[in-house]
């Protein structure tokens, strides 16, 4: 829910209040209805978790069947990412999972409590070692699974600052703030870039989601079967200029069908400041994020139109788990 609201990048640029625009009458009516719906939905967040999970699953399944345009986007992107897979079955499981995630987000927002996702022992050691170097940590992440719980788990282990995009509707920001007790830098705010660089130079961890479409300066890099997906180059540029360690952290499978936060470190040896080095680092980040999404293919928002282009004939690096193992 938060990911989609934050990332309506291209829909209505002329009426984007993040950039000083004004809504048209039609936009205002639509956004007012969405805001009232969001506030009303918070009431449901007080229901027992089991009820919410069932409601969320039913909502996701309903959207899959009643929203052909969203269903089509998800199926097309899954076909591109995983050639030869049953993309329709994966898409349906994905919509159900996203419905459950929405129910969980409602519960967390209504109750103002977030249960942090635990870090793996290996991930905790990798993060601690990177922070101890004192050069800052650029931590790339994705909207994969319970990503707010991922951020909470990381914030308990290291001094975390997260980069996010403001909602298209300023009234929704108060809802986001309930889930974000850690420091947040909003990309459209004055001086945001300076604050990001300062965060790294102070030896802190700068978390930046890099999986969704963005208006930020981008380069073409392979991602989820799309050979030239526009991807923000800013994180790589910041990391190389600050000499920071580069980590990737997302939700990942844990023993017993649970989830945990997995952290891995990317090598930057030989990469220099400049377009070539920054582009190569962006490609490495995309490759790692894509592999992580492939391990949890129903937990990423495939209904978000990430990119376009023809589907490749083969994609040996992405192997999704079978739908029968999704539980």
Image: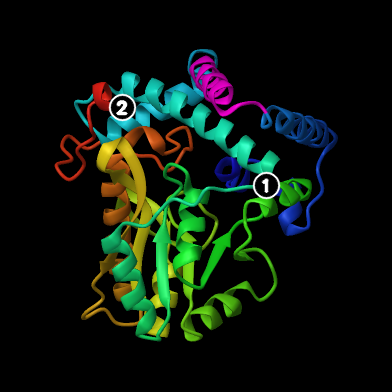
Q: Which residue is mark 2?
A: 326
Q: Is residue 165 visible?
A: yes
Is residue 130 part of the magenta span, yes or no? Answer: no
Give the quadrant of residue 59: top right
Look at the numbered disc 2 and give the secondary structure of its residue.
Answer: loop
CA gap between label 2 and label 1 equals 29 Å
Look at the numbered disc 1 and give the secondary structure of its residue.
Answer: loop
Circle on res. 112: 1
Is residue 49 part of the magenta span, yes or no? Answer: yes
**Magenta segment range?**
47-63
Judge the density around disc 1: few (<14), some (14-19), many (≥20) Cα neighbours within 10 Å.
some
Circle on res. 120: none
Q: Main secondary structure of the magenta part?
A: helix
Residue 206, image x and y in percent? 48, 70
- Nearer to us in this view, 325 or 217: 325
Q: Are marks 2 and 1 in contact (CB under 8 Å)?
A: no
Q: Along the horizontal axis of the image, is 80 left or right of 34?
A: left
Compared with 42, 165 (above or below) is: below
Give the quadrant of residue 263: bottom left
């Amino acid at each position: 829910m938060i990911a989609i609201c934050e990332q309506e990048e291209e829909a209505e640029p002329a009426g984007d209040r993040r950039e000083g625009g004004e809504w048209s009458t039609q936009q205002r009516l639509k956004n007012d209805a969405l805001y009232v719906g969001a506030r009303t939905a918070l009431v449901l967040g007080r229901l027992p978790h089991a009820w919410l999970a069932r409601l969320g699953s039913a909502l996701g399944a309903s959207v899959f069947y009643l929203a052909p345009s969203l269903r089509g986007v998800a199926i097309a992107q899954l076909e591109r990412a995983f050639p030869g897979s049953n993309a329709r079955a994966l898409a349906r499981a994905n919509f159900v999972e996203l419905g459950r995630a929405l129910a969980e987000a409602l519960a967390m927002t209504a109750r103002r409590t977030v249960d942090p996702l635990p870090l793996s022992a290996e991930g905790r050691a990798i993060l601690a070692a990177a922070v101890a170097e004192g050069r800052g940590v650029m931590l790339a992440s994705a909207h994969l699974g319970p990503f707010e719980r991922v951020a909470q788990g990381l914030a308990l282990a290291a001094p975390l600052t997260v980069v996010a995009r403001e909602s298209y509707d300023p009234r929704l920001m108060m809802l986001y703030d309930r889930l974000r007790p850690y420091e947040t830098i909003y990309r459209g705010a004055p001086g945001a870039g300076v604050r990001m660089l300062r965060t790294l130079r102070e030896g802190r961890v700068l978390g930046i989601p890099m999986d969704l479409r963005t208006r930020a300066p981008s380069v073409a890099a392979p991602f989820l079967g799309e050979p030239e997906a526009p991807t923000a180059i800013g994180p790589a540029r910041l990391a190389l200029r600050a000499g920071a360690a580069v980590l990737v952290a997302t939700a990942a499978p844990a023993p017993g069908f649970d989830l945990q936060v997995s952290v891995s470190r990317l090598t930057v040896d030989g990469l220099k400041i400049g377009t070539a080095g920054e582009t190569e680092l962006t490609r490495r980040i995309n490759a790692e994020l894509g592999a992580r999404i492939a391990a949890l293919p129903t937990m990423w928002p495939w209904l978000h139109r990430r990119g376009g282009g023809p589907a490749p004939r083969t994609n040996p690096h992405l192997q999704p788990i079978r739908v029968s193992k999704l539980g």
